[in-house]
Structures are given as C-alpha cells and as structure tokens.
Image (cartoon, grey):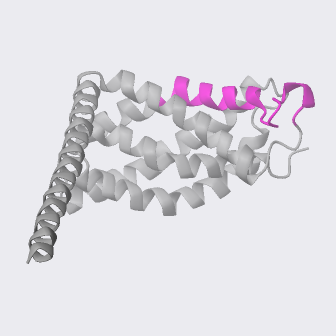
Amino acid sequence: MFSSWFFQVQKSQWERSLSQGLWRIEEKAEKSQTERRFTMNRAWTLFKAHPYISNILGYTALFASADLIQQSVLGRNPVAVSASEGSDGIVWHQTARVATVGLCFHANFNYHWLRGLERMLPGGGVKAVTRKVVLDQLIAAPVTISAFYIGLSLLENKDDPLEDWRQKFWTSYRAGVVYWSTMQAVNFAFVPPVARTAFVGGIALTFTIFLCHLRQQHRH
C-alpha cells in the first residue's frame, strides 16, 4: 500500500509540474504574440501616418536588395572594375546607383501614380480593376522600365545613355506585361489604397532582380 500511495503522490506531483510547465510555455507564447501584434500595429500606424516617407525608404531598400541578390546569386557585373568591389565581391557602387534610381524616381512615381489612378478610377470592381491594369501597363510600365535603364546609364556617365534601353526595353516590357498584369489585378482588387505602393514595392523585388540581371547580360 505504501508503494501504491507513494506512486500516486509522485504521479500527482509530476502532473502538477507538467501542468505548470505547459502553463508557463503558453503564457510566454501569448506574451510574445501580444508583443509581436503590438509591434506590427505600431508599424502599421506609423506607415499610415507617414506613407510617403515609408515608401521612399522601402523602395530604396528594395532596389538595393534587388541588385545585391542579382550580384550574389545570379552573377556580378562582368565589366565591373575590380577596385570598386568589396572584399565579398559585391560592386557597391553599382548597388548605390540602383538604389539611387529607386529613391529618386520609382518611389516618387509609383506613390503619385497609384494615388492618381485610384482617384481617376475608384473602386475594386471588375471594370475598374481592368481599366487600372490596362492604364498601368500602357503608361506606368514603359515609363518605369525606361527610367531604370536610362537612369542607371546616366549615373554611369555612359556616352550613349539610351544604349541599354534600346537593347533591353522590349524584352523587359513583354515580361512585365505578363507579371505585372496579374500582380496589379490583385493589388487593385484586394489591397487598400494606402498600402498599394508598399505592395507594389514588395512584389517589385522579383522584377527588379530580373531587370538588374538582364542589364548585365551581353554588355561590352
């Protein structure tokens, strides 16, 4: 009987310890989740309060990240001067130029373009979304692609700033029509207007990597 009683006591203590341990784990998880939710809500509040600044900073980081990924994963600039490379093989001058184009043009253009497009064609209905997508591909797409190639050529002081644009524009535009028509349809249909520039910036990472990589192909 003593052994049975002792076993029951040990079992009860073990169950109580296990229950307390699980309770502490759940408490920590809930606290961590609450803190993350608070941080996200605060970030969202700051974004809504200062959307322009948030978009400017976001696009600068986006374009810099796209070039770094292109150099690190897809291959660095084949005509880069070795003196401009860092110890890790990254051509930081090139990354700075790409970030500058994103900062000076794309962030500002997309911010004002998307706001103007929503004022001109408000709503998320099928007709409104379709018209927005068509206008976006007819106007914004060629402007932003051209600004990317010509802007970088100007920053590189190329003798012919239109050379890359002539060679790469149509390939970029055709690829962009397929990619951006789908992404912008989702953007215009489901994303709140205040967050659309940020959404475009997020999905633009893949396309900017493509542009950075395409620009380095067959360069002499």
Residue 5 image-quadrant placement: bottom left
* Placement of 164 over or under 26, stated as above or below: above
Q: What stretch is highlighted in magenta?
A: 80-108
View extreme (front): residue:
2
189 left or right, relative to 164 = left
Q: Can residue 136 be seen in this view?
A: yes
At which x and y percent is residue 107? 46, 30
137 left or right, relative to 119 = right
Q: Can residue 108 be seen in this view?
A: no
* Placement of 89 over or under 30, stated as above or below: above
17 left or right, relative to 1 = right
Q: Which residue is drawn at 82% across and 42% down?
A: 77
At which x and y percent is residue 32? 25, 41
At which x and y percent is residue 85? 84, 30
Question: In which quadrant is the N terminus drawn?
Answer: bottom left
Is residue 105 located in the magenta-colored stretch of the structure? Answer: yes
